[in-house]
Amino acid sequence: MAFYGAAKRVCVFISRNRSYSSSSSENVNLIKQLRERTSAPIKDVKAALVDSNWDIDAAQKELRKRGKVLASKKSSRIASEGLLALAQTPAKVALIELNCETDFVARNDIFRHLALCLAKQALSLDSSSSAFHVGPQSLDDTTLNLEHPKISGETTVQNAITEVAAMMGENVRLRRGYVLPTSSNGFISTYLHTSPQPGLGRIAGILSLEVDDGKTQVEALQRVGSELAMHVVAAKPLFLTKELVPSDALENEREILKSQAESSGKSQMAVEKMVEGRLRKYFEDVVFMDQKFIMNDTMNVKAVLDNLSKEVGSSVRVVNFLRMEVGEGIAGQETDDASETVAQVA
């Protein structure tokens, strides 16, 4: 009888242990499922499940509520990482910058999906005959269609950004964007540097070319256009031509160069020659048409366009260009609008 009683207690213990083991395994499985659904941190997933008595649907709703509250609290934090996303049709191209706090989030496929969707949304805005800036307020209330396994359906741009910020646990914000139309007899070339996948990158160069004969050699135009878009990224031009350099910027540069030259102790005539020589170098540094071509530094960009015009048998011109880089202009505090880039849209 004593043996029988002991055996009975052992059986009860084993039964309870199996029950506990089964329950623990189910809980781990629920944590895994909810983690896959939401991409939320594991500690937050477990806390939401515990608070919801392990009801996965209720826990998912709770995570969304918590995430939106946290996203609101984090909206003032500096977000200088992220990606540029580009969308294009034969008629125009759109480029947006979506920021986050860390490179880790920028590599997340949900973040990347949102960035591409925002670029397509910017592309759908009413067309203009000239390049125009797209601020967050231009898109906030427009409807976005997300098609990611973990975040899908129609929602406003503002809600989509808040949702992704909640999932990522970081401040996520649409900082700025541009839409550039194609001219009637031209096309747009683009180049994305440090591109993890098509349509995404950290630095973008966009170039709009126009040709007198719209039916001329398209292949040659596309080839040189792509090279010039790459040049924009590498050489960082600020102005299209000398004539477009603002007079105050030119005067300021002249004063700096004059002060430097006068410190040499040379005659006034020599100082003036030094200033003019250094101004030519300044133009070569910041003016697109005067810059040395990165693919062949024996010629400048103007010479490249002259050679292209001869090759295709028609005059080829640059209408405008744009260079944009993730996080530029953010130094210790966030800045809005396109003040950092507007000087680079010629």
Image: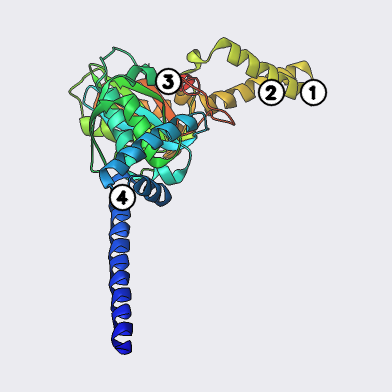
Seen at 37% across and 31% down, the residue is: 162
Neighbor class of circle 1 (other Cα within 10 Å; few <14, some 14-19, many 20+) is few
Labels 2 and 1 touching (C-beta < 8 A): yes
Is residue 52 or residue 335 the one in the foreground?
52
- Amino acid type of disc 3? Val
Sequence-wise, the earlier of marks 2 and 1 is 1
Is residue 181 or residue 246 the one in the foreground?
181
Instruction: List the residue tagged with mark 3.
Output: 345
Residue 266: mark: 1
Neighbor class of circle 4 (other Cα within 10 Å; few <14, some 14-19, many 20+) is some
Q: Residue furthest left?
A: 215
- Circle 4 or circle 3, nearest the eye: 4
Instruction: List the residue tagged with mark 4.
Output: 54
- Circle 4 or circle 2, nearest the eye: 4
Q: Residues under labels 4 and 3: Cα distance?
A: 54 Å
Q: Residues under labels 4 and 2: Cα distance?
A: 77 Å
Q: Where does the image place residue 237, in percent across and percent down from the top left? A: 48, 27
> Would you identify the image quadrant in which residue 197 lies?
top left
Seen at 59% across and 15% down, the residue is: 249
Q: Where does the image place residue 62, in percent across and percent down from the top left? A: 34, 39
Residue 315 makes an appearance in the image: no
Residue 274: mark: 2
Labels 1 and 3 touching (C-beta < 8 A): no
Sequence-wise, the earlier of marks 4 and 3 is 4
Sequence-wise, the earlier of marks 1 and 3 is 1
Q: Secondary structure at mark 3?
A: loop
Q: Residues under labels 4 and 1: Cα distance?
A: 83 Å
Q: Where does the image place residue 313, in percent across and percent down from the top left? A: 24, 24
Is residue 236 or residue 100 the one in the foreground?
100
Q: Secondary structure at mark 4?
A: loop
- Circle 1 or circle 3, nearest the eye: 3
